[in-house]
Image (tube, rainbow, N blue to C red):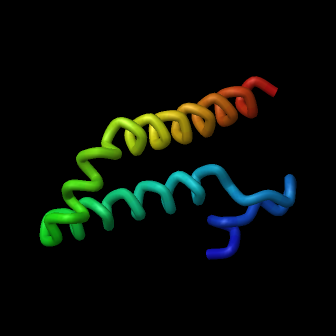
């Protein structure tokens, strides 16, 4: 389990673990928003920001994985 979160070679947190945490958080907020109107309203206001943040995070992770594969 620890190897899924921590990269021993580089001594850093794995990008995939960060993306997993972001994804689970967003999914949790969506489920909560399905039952709580105030949360749903706030999620609607922040939809573009949430989407941009998620896309940027995944893009950075994918770019880094591509660069690691070239070396």
Q: Residue furthest top?
A: 70
Q: Quadrant of the N terminus?
A: bottom right
Q: Is residue 2 left or right of residue 27?
A: right
Corner quadrant of residue 66: top right
Q: Is residue 25 left or right of residue 30?
A: right
Using the image as rendered, state which of residue 36 and residue 60 is in the foreground.
36
Corner quadrant of residue 69: top right
Corner quadrant of residue 4: bottom right
Q: Where does the image place residue 10, in percent across and percent down from the top left?
A: 86, 53
Is 62 drawn above or below residue 1 in the view shown? above
Using the image as rendered, state which of residue 10 and residue 46 is in the foreground.
46
Q: Is residue 15 left or right of residue 7?
A: left
What residue is shown at x 69% (from left), y 68% (from top)?
3
Q: Where does the image place residue 42, in percent across and percent down from the top left?
A: 28, 55
Is 8 drawn above or below residue 48 in the view shown? below
Q: Where does the image place residue 56, in percent across and percent down from the top left?
A: 53, 34
């Amino acid at each position: 389990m620890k190897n899924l979160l921590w990269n021993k070679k580089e001594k850093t947190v794995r990008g995939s673990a960060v993306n997993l945490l972001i994804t689970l958080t967003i999914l949790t907020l969506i489920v909560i928003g399905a039952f709580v109107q105030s949360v749903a309203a706030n999620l609607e206001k922040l939809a573009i920001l949430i989407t941009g943040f998620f896309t940027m995070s995944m893009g950075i992770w994918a770019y880094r994985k591509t660069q690691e594969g070239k070396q």
